[in-house]
Image: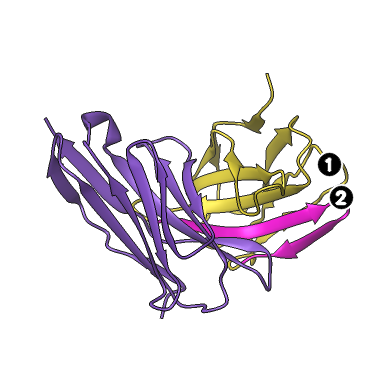
Chain colours: A purple, B yellow
Amino acid sequence: QKEVEQNSGPLSVPEGAIASLNCTYSDRGSQSFFWYRQYSGKSPELIMFIYSNGDKEDGRFTAQLNKASQYVSLLIRDSQPSDSATYLCAVMKTSYDKVIFGPGTSLSVIP
Amino acid sequence: DGGITQSPKYLFRKEGQNVTLSCEQNLNHDAMYWYRQDPGQGLRLIYYSQIVNDFQKGDIAEGYSVSREKKESFPLTVTSAQKNPTAFYLCASSPGLVAGELFFGEGSRLTVL
């Protein structure tokens, strides 16, 4: 079982719709969770992080964490073509203090 | 401006040659990381360092070596022992204030001919 799993996609949504990206992790002791966005040929950039169960909102982005079910999700409201990118879920393992990335989900927002 | 500088951006290497990728940061961050990304895949951790003169192996350290003699610098050497070195290499740093918040350089694309 991979440590961090994501649907590879591609996920296509129409402009203005809600995009929902999901991630599961295997280490129940993980405490910090991150969403990075990576445009093609570029380096990743952090868009959200979440530590506690529940929702965290930042503009059009909402991160949701459920530690009991070991999943974290990212919702993008009012999706724009500029949101088209690969979204990487990352988990910080407290034991080894390193950040582990999932394979990423490719999102395409259709005008 | 503060940031992370990786060089070179593109590098071609013949099989059997070692190559060193440079990573310099002026953000005063304590932690630095090296990741490898293959086409269509996520990032895999090669090495990381939390403090000067100390570093730990990541998940795919075989065939790679690093040093951390200065806080600002974390070079990665891809040795001839690395069997499939062609990849996109990303260096990152973290201030540690938000554990796991990584700031990435622009990456170095290595192609072995």
Instruction: Give coordinates of residue B84: x percent, y percent.
Output: 50, 59
Q: Residues within 10 Å of mark 2 (few under 14, many from 20)?
A: some
Q: Residue at x 38, y 77 (%)?
A: A69
The verdict on a common chain for dots 2 and 1 is: yes
Frontmost residue, B111 versus B4: B4
Q: Amino acid at mark 1?
A: Lys
Most frequent secondary structure within the magenta stretch = strand
Whole-percent x, y for residue B41 in the image? 38, 56
CB contact under 8 Å: marks 2 and 1: yes
Q: Residue under circle 1?
A: B71
Q: Quadrant of residue B26?
A: top right
Mark pair 2, 1: CA separation: 6 Å
Residue B42 image label: none
**As shown in the figure, which amino acid type bears the numbered disc 2?**
Val
**Chain ID, mark 2:** B
Q: Position of residue A55 (x, y in %)?
A: 40, 56
The chain identifier of the residue carrying mark 1 reads: B
Q: Is residue A36 magenta?
A: no
Per the rendered image, the range of residues in magenta is: B42-58
Horizontal side of A64 relative to A48 (left or right) equals: left
Label 2 sits on residue: B52
